[in-house]
Amino acid sequence: MSAEERLERARVLYERAVFDGEAGVLEVADRELDAVEAGLALARGRIMHARFFEDGNEDPRELALFERATELYRALGDPRGESESLLWVGLLHQVVRGDDDTAVPFLERSHELAARAGDKLLMSYALRHLGTAEHAAGRLETARERLEESVRLRRELGFWPGVAANLVGLIYIAAAQGRRDDALALAKEASALAEASGARNIAHQIEEARTRV
């Protein structure tokens, strides 16, 4: 249900409570509005996260927005929504603050809830960033497994820019493991995918990785 539909339903429930005296409908209206608030908090937090890549500054409101979304989705009994908000909490700690130790439990819980909800895209994101944490910790084989599973899910979904992004990480892992031929083959595939999907930022990352092989 869209935000507009939820807001309209809340309006109708208000009228039923005020004009018809129906008991209990305001609790339903509250839940509809909580779902809208959770979605808005998540959306605002994502925009703040994107701005970090423009100016390198963390917005102090970002974490509070993701935590509020998590709280609301949990209260609503929405595992998919909770998974997404926890993913963004993890990303803030990992990407913005460079703190994998804090990020990993949020990412693991996000993956667990995404699997329960059957959301392969969210699973792929959690696995990607869990793989990144393993790579940073020097656990290359585990990092490879996480990223390869994320790639598999993204291939199933036809999420080709996301596949290309994950291949960048696999290029670095292959190079670190001395698998130069594998690294070059991954770079070739990643370049083709990035070009076909117009993912220019990923294409730059691929070229940088290729120069280091």
Image: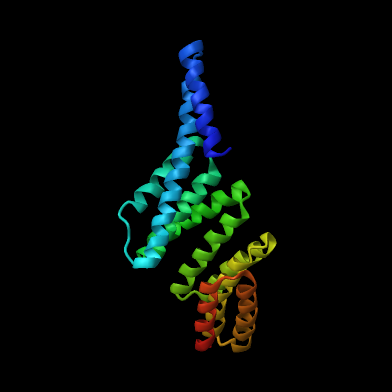
Residue 143 visible somewhere in the drawing? yes
Camera-nearest residue between 143 and 77: 77
Q: Position of residue 34 (x, y in %)?
A: 45, 35
- What residue appears at the point 49 percent right and 46 percent down from the top-left corner? 82
Camera-nearest residue between 67 and 65: 65
In this view, which residue lies farthest toward the right?
156
Q: Position of residue 124 (x, y in %)?
A: 58, 60
Q: Position of residue 25 (x, y in %)?
A: 50, 20
Q: Residue 90: name its quadrant.
A: bottom left
Residue 103 visible somewhere in the drawing? no
Q: Residue 37: name its quadrant.
A: top left
- What residue appears at the point 57 percent right and 82 percent down from the top-left corner? 174
Q: Residue 5: name its quadrant.
A: top right
Q: In this view, does 66 lie to the left or right of 153?
A: left
Residue 39 lies, with reference to residue 15, above or below; the image says: below
User: Image quadrant for the N terminus?
Assistant: top right
Question: Is the image coloured rainbow, by chain, by secondary structure, or in one colour?
Answer: rainbow
Q: Where is residue 38 in the image (x, y as percent from the top left)?
A: 45, 41
- What residue appears at the point 63 percent right and 84 percent down from the top-left corner? 182
